[in-house]
Amino acid sequence: MKARLSFFHLVIIGLTNFLFSGCDKTKNIYKSSTSKKDYLTINAVTLTHCGCTHLYADRYKNGKLDFQVFYNDNLARKTMFDYSRDSKAPQTYSLLATTNESFTTPFDSVDLEIFRAIDSAIIKKQGFIYPIRRTQYKGYVVDTLLNPN
């Protein structure tokens, strides 16, 4: 009886793991260069448990993550990583993209490249299983949720 119960628990754990992690799919939809230290990638991550797609743009400088732009149907957030301190974990600072003209930080050339590539991928449905809504962002504002100060 105890062996059956252990086997049953193992089967339940295996099925749960498969349902929540085994079906997600990541597809690279953009890479700026073949450099191993300085490049920009954009990945479409399809999450089957919620039926949604998220986009992640990661920029690497000198082999370290410089910033990441997260994009989905509800928001676009840019998180910058600062490795200047001696700590092992970088300091982070986040900005939210906004659709109105009251932005405080304009897009730079890399941001424009990212949003053009994202817009193009959305229009072509490149790498998506679930559709994602295109949003015309104009610039960034401070993310007061993640940067309370």
Image (tube, rainbow, N blue to C red):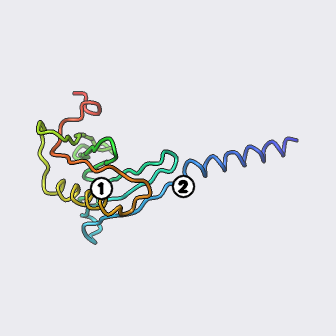
Which residue is most to the bottom?
Answer: 34
> In x, y percent, where is residue 79?
26, 44
Image vertical order of residue 10 relative to residue 40, above or below: above
The label number, if any, that marks residue 23 in the structure image: 2
> What is the quadrant of the C terminus in the image?
top left
Label 2 SS: loop
The label number, if any, that marks residue 131 in the structure image: none
Front tag of 2 and 1: 2
Badge 1 amino acid: Asp
> Residue shown at 43%/54% (left/top)?
130
Badge 2 amino acid: Cys
CA neighbours of label 2 inside 10 A, class few (<14), some (14 to 19), many (20+): few
Give me the C-alpha separation between circle 2 and circle 1. Answer: 23 Å
CA neighbours of label 1 inside 10 A, class few (<14), some (14 to 19), many (20+): many
Label 1 SS: strand
Query: For mark 1, what is the residue?
Result: 58
Image vertical order of residue 26 relative to residue 52, above or below: below
**Is 136 on the left-hand or right-hand side of 42?**
left
Depth order, front residue of 54/67:
54
Q: Quadrant of residue 109?
A: bottom left
> Residue shown at 43%/48% (left/top)?
52
Image vertical order of residue 147 relative to residue 136, above or below: above
The tag earlier along the polypeptide, 2 or 1, is 2
> Residue shown at 83%/45% (left/top)?
4
**Is 91 on the left-hand or right-hand side of 111?**
right
**Is 31 on the left-hand or right-hand side of 100?**
right
> In x, y percent, where is residue 51?
47, 48
> Residue shown at 35%/61% (left/top)?
125
